[in-house]
Image (tube, helix red, strand yellow):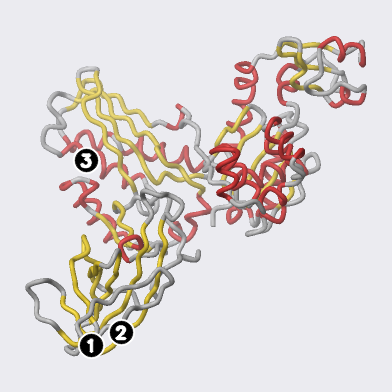
Amino acid sequence: MTRVMVLWCPDWPVVSHLGPDTPADAPVAVIDGQVVVACSAAARQEGVRRGMRRRDAQARCPDVILCAHDPAADARAFEPVLDLVEELSAQVAPLRPGLCGVTVPARYYGGEAEAAAVLAEQLVEHGIWDVRCGIADDLFAAEQAARQAPPQDSVVVGPGGSADFVRDLPVAVLGDPEMADLLRRLGIRTLGDYARLEIADVRTRFGPSGVLAHRWARGEDPRLLSRREIPPDLVGRVPFEPPLDRVEAIAFSMRRAAESFVSALAERGAVATAIRIEIDSDGVLSHARTWRHPRWFSSADIVDRVRWQAQVPGVITAPVDEVRVVPEAVEQVGDHAESLFGDGVDEGVERVVARVQSLVGPEAVRTAGVQGGSSPGERQLASTWGDRPAEVRDLARPWPGSIPEPAPARVFAAPEPAQVVGAEGQPVIVTSRGGLTGEPARFRLGADQPWQPVAGWAGPWPLDDLWWDEHAARRIARFQVVGVDGSAWLMCVEDGRWWTEARYD
C-alpha cells in the first residue's frame, strides 16, 4: 500500500508576506477585499479570526499589520519549499501554497516518523520554523493528521486506520461551509455520523461533491498525488556543434550527459523509471518518444535507448542539433533498493525485451497479471512491458459474485452462446431469489455442437451488477460445469440465456 505524507506550513499567506524587518511575533492579517483570509498566531491571540471583516479585525487588534492577499505571490514563495522537499522525496505534489503531499520514503529513512523528522529538519534549517507532518493511507486523512501535529513534529495514522482517525472530526473539516451547516441542522455533527449514511441517500441529496466527502469520511479518499513538473535542471541536454547524422556518434556523445543525468537524480535520492527522449533536427523537434523501465534507468540504459530510437527508419532525416532526456516518472531510490543491490528483473531479459520494444513499438510488448474483479475478464490485467499499470483493482477486497479458485486457464474474448437443460430437456434458469428451476443434466457449447451429459456442476454465484442504474443493471449467475469427457467450463446465465465465458484446463 502506498502511504501518503502531507507537509503543512500553517498560515502560509502570512509567512509569505513577512519581510526580514517584520518581527516574528507581530500581529499580521491577510485581507482579500474586506475579509480576513489568514492571520498570524499573535493576531489570533488578540481575537482576530479568519472570515472576520477588516474593521472588526482592526477593532480587536489596532496594531494589526494588514496585507493584501496575493495568491500568485504565495505560490512563488512556496516554490523554494517544494525544491527543498524534492531533494529528499522525488514524488512531490503541491496541493496549495503552504501544503504539499509526498509519497512516504519510509524504507530509505528507516520508518515513517523518521522520514517526517528528516523532512521537517530540512525545512527548519532553511527558515521554515513551523512545519507539521501527517501520514496516512489517503490524502484527506494525512492532511487532517498534519493539522493535529505539534510544530516540527508528525502524527502517523496506522495502515487501515484512516476511517477510525477521522471518525470524531467535525463536519466543518470537509471544507464546504454550506454543506457543513446543513449537516449540523440534520443532527450530523461528525464525520463518523456522515459515514454511516447510505451512499444512495448522499448522492441524491448532495450530489458528486457529497459523495466525495462521504468517501473522505470513510477513509477512502480516491485522489492520487499528482507530481509537479520536472525541474529544468534535471533535464539532460546534449547540443551537437556541428550537427551529427551518424547514430553511433550520437550515442557515444550521450555517455557523459547520461551519467550526469543519473547523478543529478541520485543527489535528490531518486531514480527515473520513465524518460522521454527528444531529438532536434534543423532547430526543431523532429522526434520524441517515452521509454519506460521495469526497474530504473542507468546511464547505459539511457545511451541504449537513444541509439535504438535514432536507428528507427525515418527518425534521423537531417543532422541532429540536440538530444534531450526528460524524466517523466521519478521515484524514491529506497523503493528500488533491492534492484540496486542485485535483485529484481534479470538484466539480460530486460535488455532483450527493451530491444524488441525499440523494433516493434512499446505498446506491442505486454505483460499479463491479475487484479480484482467478479468475472474472469475483469480479473485480467495486461500492461505495457516496463510500465506500471494505474488504477489496479485490489485483489484483497471482497468481490461479490466472484468464483472460487482455481481460475480458468482460457478466458474467451467474448462469451460464446451455450445451452443448459434439465433431465427432461427443460431450460435451466435462475430465479430472482437465486434458486434454480432445475438441476443441470445436459449442455452444449453451440447450436451446432452435440449435447453432452453433465458429470458435475457447482454454483450458482449470483451477481446484481450496477443495480442502482436502471438502464445498465445486470443480473448474472455463474456456474462451473464439467462434462463426462472431462472438459470443464465456466458458464453464466443472464435473462434466461446461457453463455460460456472460460475453460478450465
Mark seen at residue 423: 1
Say what secondary structure mark 3 lies in: helix
Mark 3: amino acid: Arg
Q: Is residue 164 above or below residue 95?
A: below
Quadrant of the rendering where the C terminus is positioned: bottom left
* Residue nearest the viewer, comparing 6 with 59: 59
State yes or no: discs 1 and 2 in contact (Cβ < 8 Å): yes
Residue 153 appears in view:
no
The residue at the far left in this view is: 448
Task: Select label 1 or label 3 by which is in front.
Answer: 1
The residue that appears at 53% across and 46% down in the rendered structure is 222
How busy is the neighbourhood of tag 2: few (under 14 within 10 Å), some, or many (20 plus)?
Answer: some
Tags 1 and 3 touching, CB below 8 Å: no
Nearer to us in this view, 165 or 158 = 165
Q: Nearer the viewer, residue 400 or 470?
A: 470
Q: Earlier in the sequence, mark 1 or mark 2?
A: 1
User: Are discs 2 and 3 less than 8 Å apart at CB?
Assistant: no
Q: Is residue 409 left or right of residue 474?
A: left
Quadrant including the N terminus: bottom right
Q: Is residue 484 left or right of residue 223?
A: left
Cα separation, mark 1 vs mark 3, equals 68 Å
Q: Nearer the viewer, mark 2 or mark 3?
A: 2
Q: Is residue 160 left or right of residue 504?
A: right
The numbered disc on residue 439 is: 2
| Residue at the disc numbered 3 | 307
| Residue 76 screen position, x and y as percent | 60, 20
Which residue corresponds to the image point at 45% horizontal and 64% vertical from the top-left?
Answer: 395
Q: Which mark is residue 188?
A: none
